[in-house]
Amino acid sequence: MSQLAGDFSQAKDLIGPPPSQKDTVALRLWRTFFGSMLNSAITLVCAIMLVWLVPKLVNWFLLDATWSGTAQECRQASGACWAFVREKARVMIFGVYPAEELWRPTLMMLLFGLMVGASMVKRLWRKELIYAWAAVVPVLLVLMAGGVFGLAPVPTNRWSGLPVTLLLSLFGLVIAFPLAIVLALGRRSTMPLIRMLSVCYIELIRGVPLISLLFMASVILPLFLPAGTTIDKLLRAQIAIILFAAAYLAEVVRAGLQGIPRGQYEASDSLGLTYWQSMRLIILPQALKMVIPPLVGTFIGFFKDTTLIIIVGLFDFLFSVRAPLADPNWLGFSTEAYVFAAAIYFVFCYTMSKYSQYLERELSPERQR
C-alpha cells in the first residue's frame, strides 16, 4: 500500500497541480507563450521579428505605395506600385479574352458566385437547387463561347484568366466526386473483378503526375482518334483533371467508408435495405461527414493545380497575371503582380476552408439532434 501511495505521489508531481477554477484567458496565454524557457525564447524572437518586419510591410503596402500614376512615378517611390495592378487588372483577370466582350465573363463569374453562394446555404439543399444548376451551367458556357442569341463566338483558345480557373476547377471537381464515390465503393467491393479494376485505376492515376495526364490528353489522345476527329483542347484538359481528381478523392472517400463501424452495415442489413439503399441512406452520409476536412483540402489543392494547364497551351489565372510583366513600360513590378495573384487565391482557398469548418459544425451529431 505504501508503495502504491508513493507511486501516486510521484505521478501527481509529474502531472502538476490541477488547473485553477479562476483560470483566465490571460493566464492561459501566459502559459502558452511564457510557460517554459523555450517558449519564452521563441516568443521573444518572434516579437522582435514582428516589431522589425510589420512597420516595413505597412510602409511598403500602404504608406509609401503608389496607388495611381505612371510607371516612372512608381519607380521614384519606395513602396508598392498598385498603379500597375490597376492599369493591368483587366488583363490579369480576363487574359486574352476579347476586350469588347468582357461583360460576358464578368456576368458568368457573377452567376457562378451566386450559385455557389446559394449552394453553401444548408436550407437550400433541395432538388430545386440541382435543377437550378442544370439550368445555369449551359448559360455559363453560352456566355463564354457565344455563337448563339447574337453573341459573337469566342474560341476556347481565347478563354483565359480567372474564368478558366473557375470553370476547370468547378466542373472538374463536381464531375470527379461521383466518380470517386463509385471507385471507392468498387475498391471495397467483394467482387474480385470490380475491386481489381478500381485498384488498378486508382493506383495507376495516383502513380503519375497531373502534368503527364495533361500531356497525354493533349498530345497522345488525338493519335487514337479517327482521322479528321478533333476534341477541343480545353475539353481534353478538363477530362484529364477529372480523371486525376477522381483517383485522389476516391481514396479520401474510402478512408471514410473504412471508419464506419461494422455495426452500421449490420443494422442496414437487418432493416432489409439493399446494397445501394444502405450506401445512400446510412453509410455514405456518415462517411462523407467524417472526411470533410481532407475532402476540402483536396479541393483546395486541385483548385491551385489548374495552373498546370499552361503546359498544354491554355491560359489560367496565374498566366494572365504574369502576362503584363512583359510590357516594357511596366517592367520591374512582378512583386505586386504576384501579391495580387496570391490575394485572389487566398480569398478562394480561405473561403473553402472556413466553409468546411461550418459544415463540420452543422453536420455534427450534436447539431442533428
Image (tube, rainbow, N blue to C red):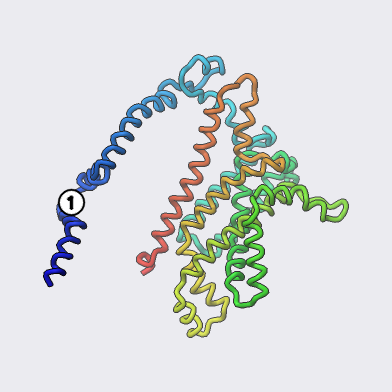
189 in relation to 14, above or below: below
Left or right: residue 272 compared with residue 176: left
Residue 280: horizontal and vertical position, in percent?
A: 54, 72
Q: Between residues 328 and 113, which one lies in front from this camera angle? A: 328
Q: Residue furthest left?
A: 2
Residue depicted at 50% across the width and 14% down the height: 76
Residue at x 36% of width, y 64% of height: 367
Query: Which residue corresponds to the image point at 49% horizontal and 84% vertical from the top-left?
Result: 271
Q: Which quadrant of the figure contains the N terminus?
A: bottom left
**Residue tagged 1:** 23
Image vertical order of residue 66 relative to residue 364, above or below: above
Position of residue 37 in the picture relative to residue 221 (left or right): left
Which sits in the foreground, 285 or 127?
285
Residue 7 visible, this angle: yes
- Tell me if residue 151 can be seen: no
Residue 149 or 71: which is nearer the viewer? 71
Q: Is residue 305 left or right of residue 16?
A: right
Q: Position of residue 319 (x, y in %)?
A: 63, 36
Residue 228 place in picture, x, y as percent: 87, 51
Q: Quadrant of the C terminus?
A: bottom left
Q: Amino acid at mark 1?
A: Asp
Could you say where residue 130 lies in the image, as x and y percent from the top left?
A: 58, 61
Above-or-below relation of 187 to 92: below
Direction right: furthest residue: 227
Please identify the residue farthest to the front as the structure is shown: 3
Which secondary structure lies at badge 1? loop
Mark 1 burial class by Cα count in 10 Å: few <14, some 14-19, many 20+: few
The number of numbered discs placed on residues in the rendered structure image is 1
Q: Residue at the spot x=60%, y=74% of the render?
A: 189
